[in-house]
Image (cartoon, helix red, strand yellow):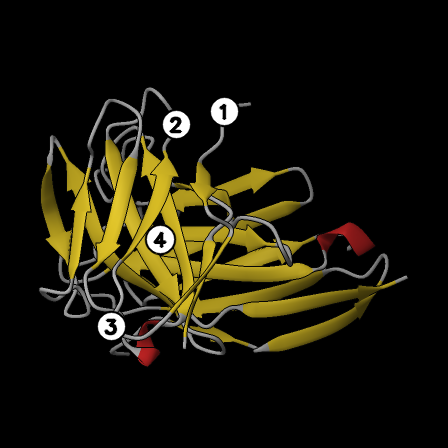
Amino acid sequence: ILNVEQSPQSLHVQEGDSTNFTCSFPSSNFYALHWYRWETAKSPEALFVMTLNGDEKKKGRISATLNTKEGYSYLYIKGSQPEDSATYLCASPRGGYQKVTFGTGTKLQVIP
Amino acid sequence: EPEVTQTPSHQVTQMGQEVILRCVPISNHLYFYWYRQILGQKVEFLVSFYNNEISEKSEIFDDQFSVERPDGSNFTLKIRSTKLEDSAMYFCASSEYPTGTGLTDTQYFGPGTRLTVL
């Protein structure tokens, strides 16, 4: 992996379903992995900053895990609600502590 | 809750003109950033700024771009001679600590300025 990649690009789930998506990043020279939630017409909102291999973070129904050795992070949403509909971005500093490279995002649509 | 603000929300300019995009970071934050997103593409890092100087910049941030903290609250991005390809959403962000240090380095984003170059 040379870049920060996210999959899937978009996802439709029914209200109440749990879902997860993936962020892949180069495992070499890893500094940190950021997850953001970005609702249309709003600012990206920081969800998690993860730095250590094996990190697990949780915020309400949303949680994330980090595997720095294999270069991936999963974001989980338990019991999806319509208000979870947003684009979820991951980002990692590459080539410098602050040169943050973003993935293309996963657009989640939760259907009531 | 403190937030990052940006003005204007939308700026339309003619090719070759200079534009200044303004940001007011969160007051106790020390690290400032500019990003942009061209329609349909990824969010791209432009520059980071600390202690009144650029700490890192991307290949995009060429001599046409400059940043400044003219007073204790504003953080500006200037594009000297705009090109059509500068049309994008420009986001400012700030953090209390620098990214990647493992400290609380969450970046808080502003709502963006949509720049349209005609």
Please state the horizontal and vertical placement of residue B53, each as a whole percent of the image: 8, 39
How far separated are the C-alphas under marks 4 and 3? 37 Å
| Disc number placed over residue A46 in the picture, else none | none
Q: Nearer the viewer, mark 3 or mark 2?
A: 3
The residue indicated by pointer 4 is A33
At which x and y percent is residue A31? 22, 51
Q: Which residue is mark 3?
A: B16
Q: Give whichever of discs 1 and 2 has the lower sequence position.
A: 1
Q: Which mark is residue B26?
A: 2
- Measured from the top left, where is residue B40 in percent x and y? 49, 78
The subunit letter for the residue under badge 2 reads: B
The chain identifier of the residue carrying mark 3 reads B
Give the residue number, with chain letter if any, for mark 1: B2
Q: From mark 2 to mark 4, how far is it between C-alphas?
A: 22 Å
Graded by Cα atoms within 10 Å as few (under 14), some (14 to 19) or many (20 or more), the crowding at tag 3 reads some
Marks 1 & 2 on one chain: yes
Q: Are marks 1 and 2 in contact (CB under 8 Å)?
A: yes
